[in-house]
Amino acid sequence: MTDRDHLTWGELLDMLEDRDPKPDRRKHFDDCEPCHERLESLRGWMDALPEALGPGAPDVWRRRAEQRAAPRSFLRPLQGVYKALVVFDSDEQSRVGVRSAGVGDRQWLLATDRLEIEVTLSHPDEKSPFGISGQIFSVAGDPPPLVGCKVRLEIEGRTLEETHSEPHGEFMIQARPTSAFQLIVVGEGWEVATPELTP
C-alpha cells in the first residue's frame, strides 16, 4: 500500500458526513491506522466549529467553515517547485532511529512542509552496488503519488545519473559522489531539490 492509496482529506470529509467511500476505500480505511488518525483530527476540527462560529451564525457561513475545516494545504494537490531543508545530518547528530545500519555511511533527512526525503551515502570502503539509497515520504496533506518519481543526481548542475522511485518511494543510485552533490526529485506537477550535500 502506497501513500497514494490512503484516503484523501476530501474522502474523509465525506465519511464524516455519512457519505461512505467506495468499498475498496472503506476496506482500506478499516485496516489503516494513519487514516483513522486523520479522521479523528478532522473530527476534532469539525467539532470545534460550532464554538468558533457562535449561535445564530448564517448557514452559508457554517457550510463555508466546514469546507475549510481542513487546512487548504492538506486538500490541494502538491504542485510547484520546492527546496528541501536538512533536518538531520548523521555527521552532526546522534544516529538514533536512522534507517541505515551501516557504521561508516552518511545519512541525511531533508524536509519540506509536505514531504521528507531520507538519503544515505554508502561508505567508500563498503562493497555496495549502490552509492546512494533513499526514500521519499509524504508527511502532510493530500499525499502525492510517490511511485515512479524521477530522482536525479546532479553535480555542479550536471546530471550524473537518473532513476525512478519504487512503490513506497524508495530509490537507489549506483554512482557514489565524492564531492558536493544535489538530488532533484520530480513527481506529477511538483519538484523538490535538496541543498548541496557534502560527503
Image: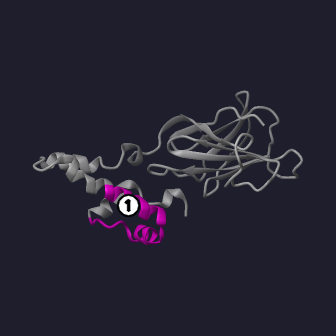
- Residue 22 falls inside the magenta stretch: yes
- x 52%, y 57%: residue: 3
Q: Is residue 81 left or right of residue 45?
A: right
| Amino acid residing under circle 1 | Leu
Where 90 sits versus 39, above or below? Answer: above
- x 60%, y 57%: residue: 168
Q: Quadrant of residue 185?
A: top right
Helix, strand or loop at mark 1:
helix
| Residue 91 spot, x, y in % from top left | 75, 41
Looking at the image, the residue that sits furthest to the top is 156
| Residue 59 spot, x, y in % from top left | 13, 50
**Which stretch did the figure color magenta?**
18-44
Q: Out of 23 and 96, give the one closest to the viewer.
A: 96
- x 47%, y 39%: residue: 79
| Residue 187 spot, x, y in % from top left | 56, 44
Where 46 sits versus 19, above or below? Answer: above
- x 47%, y 62%: residue: 34
Where 140 sits versus 13, above or below? Answer: above
Q: Residues within 10 Å of mark 1 (few under 14, many from 20)?
A: many
Per the image, the residue denoted by label 1 is 39
Q: Out of 62 and 101, give the one closest to the viewer.
A: 101
User: Which quadrant does the N terminus fall into?
Assistant: bottom right
| Residue 40 spot, x, y in % from top left | 37, 61
- Residue 131 falls inside the magenta stretch: no
